[in-house]
Image (cartoon, coloured by chain):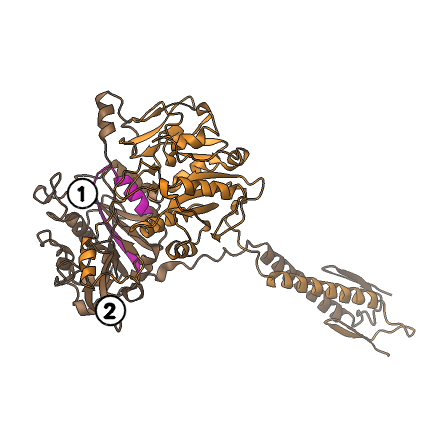
Chain colours: A orange, B brown
Amino acid sequence: MNKVKIWTAGLAFSCNSVMGGQPCDCLPPLRAAAEQLRQKDLRISQLQAELRRPPPAPAQPPEPEALPTIYVVTPTYARLVQKAELVRLSQTLSLVPRLHWLLVEDAESPTPLVSGLLAASGLLFTHLVVLTPKAQRLREGEPGWVHPRGVEQRNKALDWLRGRGGAVGGEKDPPPPGTQGVVYFADDDNTYSRELFEEMRWTRGVSVWPVGLVGGLRFEGPQVQDGRVVGFHTAWEPNRPFPVDMAGFAVALPLLLAKPNAQFDSTAPRGHLESSLLSHLVDPKDLEPRAANCTRVLVWHTRTEKPKMKQEEQLQRQGRGSDPAIEV
Amino acid sequence: MNKVKIWTAGLAFSCNSVMGGQPCDCLPPLRAAAEQLRQKDLRISQLQAELRRPPPAPAQPPEPEALPTIYVVTPTYARLVQKAELVRLSQTLSLVPRLHWLLVEDAESPTPLVSGLLAASGLLFTHLVVLTPKAQRLREGEPGWVHPRGVEQRNKALDWLRGRGGAVGGEKDPPPPGTQGVVYFADDDNTYSRELFEEMRWTRGVSVWPVGLVGGLRFEGPQVQDGRVVGFHTAWEPNRPFPVDMAGFAVALPLLLAKPNAQFDSTAPRGHLESSLLSHLVDPKDLEPRAANCTRVLVWHTRTEKPKMKQEEQLQRQGRGSDPAIEV
């Protein structure tokens, strides 16, 4: 009796039933079984490989590609509280997604304090610098309204947005054509609720809302009826074209780009600086009320006291002043 | 010739080689093959089930269970800028992991403004209330040093930490025994870098650092040699036991709990309030210098100007004052 040996993957046997020199007809089913086993081994290998594959990247918080960018324009100038104010503001801005900070120094060249602060902020930023011309500068003791502060700096940021360059640090390229965005002028001493930024993000033209603690009032702001701005709550020259504070409006970027001559006028009369920009851009009746039809205060015109340095001067006279190497 | 039919999972054949009424010895290997096929099908099902299982939860940022909690104690009182200050501070605190805000109102009962702000803050908080006794209250126009503000409120927070209850909102249970933590007294008008909180987190006893724009100086702060505090840079009574500002130190929670009588003394002379607590807790030579051996300013004693309300009063006399229903 001849034996026929058959080896297949994982299956070996010998057939002892050979008839007429031919193996018995067990052979085809055994071969079929061997093939099926081979195929199942293959499938198992494939599945094991699939399981070993690293898991897909964890679902990211939805990338806010679709969100319009908020361009926050902040003029700033060197003074004792400058770093404190900028730290505070930068930390607030860090809570807002899809935000680009345009920080504009009133200086001849970028200062190490501001450059260092921007670099450490973790924000997307553009660093700009422009010195206010001497004729427009406030003299010691002059009240702020003699020359409105920050005009040149805000216009410098508008220039950059319009592709006229000038960045000294951070992102140097202006927004690419077609960028959806909104521009907000945020001085470094005000207080901003993080909620404010979501109110302004989807501005189509010019959006407005109340500002707390400004103009000698608890708040100033637009008066709204049926979803439209019909007037302004303010005590100071209510007949100005736009009796709104710098912190009380935002402008869609496409609108600003479509009106390349719209900018702030440093010679505007007291209280008319905002109007000098907005008159180029929008009719008052088309202002878009935000913050629950202008019934919520989400920004406050806070002002920080100028610190007294009497003791510092005394100690300095004795050669014991605060270590100038320590940045404050 | 008899045929023996064998069916197995996915494998059917008939043996036509029966010898003496017995099927040929192909049968055992075929049965083995069938069993192997069954097992491989099982394995494939298991692997497919594993693949269908939802992926593991994405790697969370390491749960900061191991971080000591920072208890931030903030006394606050009603005034025009209160909400602005608290919004600003709460947003800063929201950047700090493992932080518990103890907000203590100087009031008879919790105010809607503060309760609402806490609820909206997203912070872990405890809301406390204690009215400053009339004899210790500042009268209109009195300078702040006549009665140091916030003494009762800070002591109320210490009471709560020590299990003496009194919370009116938020987390009402005090830290469980053995909690690792640190206590910091953060007034609502100062400016805090988020970095400051990581400096204080691992305080063993009492840690210290400089404070900007305080005491008439660019900064006040400990002087450090070889990693130890050897003196203090200050212009005001440098011989006070602890010539440090309220914003310039933090205390380990276990130390505070181990000294149940340590609290602020409302009758302490001007500039000695901090010393009235710290004298119970630590020897000046054992203070732990932080912030790069006290060479970095990460907190500023900023003060917010009291807003003028002249126009508000005028409009109110004409019945046109700012809508009192709008919270500012």
Please tell me which residue is depicted at 54% across the width and 48% down the height of the picture: A173
Residue B285, given in percent of the width and then of the height, sits at 18, 70
The residue pinned by badge 2 equals: B224
Please tell me which residue is depicted at 37% across the width and 50% down the height of the picture: A91
Bin the neighbour count of mark 2 within 10 Å (Cα to Cα): few under 14, some 14-19, many 20 and up.
some
Please tell me which residue is depicted at 24% across the width and 20% down the height of the picture: B319
Answer yes or no: are tags 1 and 2 on the same subunit.
Answer: yes
Q: Is residue A271 above or below residue B83?
A: above
The residue pinned by badge 1 equals: B106
Residue A226, given in percent of the width and then of the height, sits at 42, 21
Front residue (pair A102, A68):
A102
Q: CA distance from mark 1 to mark 2?
A: 37 Å
Q: Nearer the viewer, mark 1 or mark 2?
A: 2
Quadrant location, the N terminus of chain B: bottom right
Quadrant location, the C terminus of chain B: top left
Front residue (pair A3, B55):
B55
The chain identifier of the residue carrying mark 1 reads B
What amino acid type is highlighted by mark number 1? Asp
- The residues colored magenta run B68-90
Front residue (pair A180, A173):
A173
The chain identifier of the residue carrying mark 2 reads B
Question: Picture quarter containing residue B255?
Answer: bottom left
Mark 1: secondary structure: loop
Please give left or right for residue A24 compared with residue B138 in the image: right
What amino acid type is highlighted by mark number 2? Val
